[in-house]
Image (cartoon, rainbow, N blue to C red):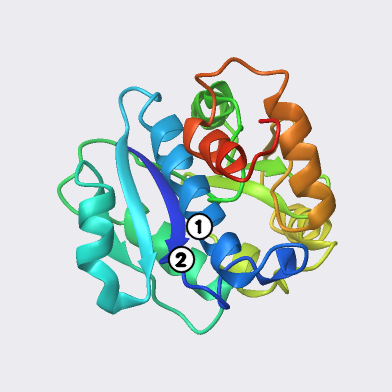
Amino acid sequence: MRFLSVVAKRPAPGQTKTRLCPPLDGTAAATLYACFLQDTLSLMRQVPDVCRTLAYAPPEELAYFRALAPDFALVPQQGADLGERLDNLLTGLLQETGTPGPSQAVVMDSDSPTLPPAYLADAFQALDQGADVVLGPCDDGGYYLIGLTRPQPRLLREVTMSTDHVLQDTLAIARELRLAVALLPTWYDVDTAAELERLEQELATLPATVAPATRGWFAARGLGA
């Protein structure tokens, strides 16, 4: 069974995308993130032959996410920090009972609305071809995607997340564990004002069908995308 999952939280002014404030205010940042999430779900729907899941937070927001993604399996995030939450999610998916054959689990972020869907398909192909771990590097030193064929708690629980060396720390542990690692093309997530400007410029060069919700956010603000 192939699982494709996204980690998301309900947008909330003052709590979501705070590194974009300024230049945005809290409401604009939360609205933008809601658009990112809509576009992320749409691009996940373009990947065939996978079980799509959404790991949501906070746990009391099930109804919100059920309305947003009625075609996804919904699972609450569990853990004290991001590393624990990712490990619990991946382990839960890979140990899902009642699934035929070996499992693969790929988890992506919800901050990369223009990510090419082909990269998601490539992640599963890398696992098919023998990789133990597949990572999608971000140019800020993190990663936008991780995929596994079996639980690997050290890769997630022993790395300090949200730093500029997350990817390198993860690769170092993978080498210690003698895991075969595949790297996807580098992409970016949108956390800063510079990355937001990059996104606006990129959207101007892409077909109108790419990230329509995010485009609508820019258009509503009278900007070029």
Q: Are marks 1 and 2 in contact (CB under 8 Å)?
A: yes
Residue 75 coordinates in the image, percent (x, y): 28, 62
Q: Does residue 173 appear in this view?
A: yes
Q: Does residue 133 appear in this view?
A: no
Residue at 84% x, 62% y is 165
Residue 214 coordinates in the image, percent (x, y): 55, 39
Looking at the picture, which amino acid does disc 2 mark? Pro
Mark drawn on residue 11: 2
Residue corresponding to mark 1: 31
In the image, 161 versus 177, the foreground residue is 161
Residue at 80% x, 39% y is 198
Looking at the picture, which amino acid does disc 1 mark? Thr
In the image, 131 versus 61, the foreground residue is 61
Q: Is residue 83 above or below residue 48?
A: below
Residue at 55% x, 31% y is 123
Residue 141 coordinates in the image, percent (x, y): 82, 54
Quarter of the figure with the N terminus: top left
- Number of marks in the rendered image: 2
Q: Is residue 208 left or right of residue 174?
A: left
Secondary structure of residue under mark 2: loop
Mark drawn on residue 1: none
Q: CA distance from mark 1 to mark 2?
A: 7 Å
Mark 1 or 2, closer to the camera: 1
Residue at 52% x, 46% y is 36
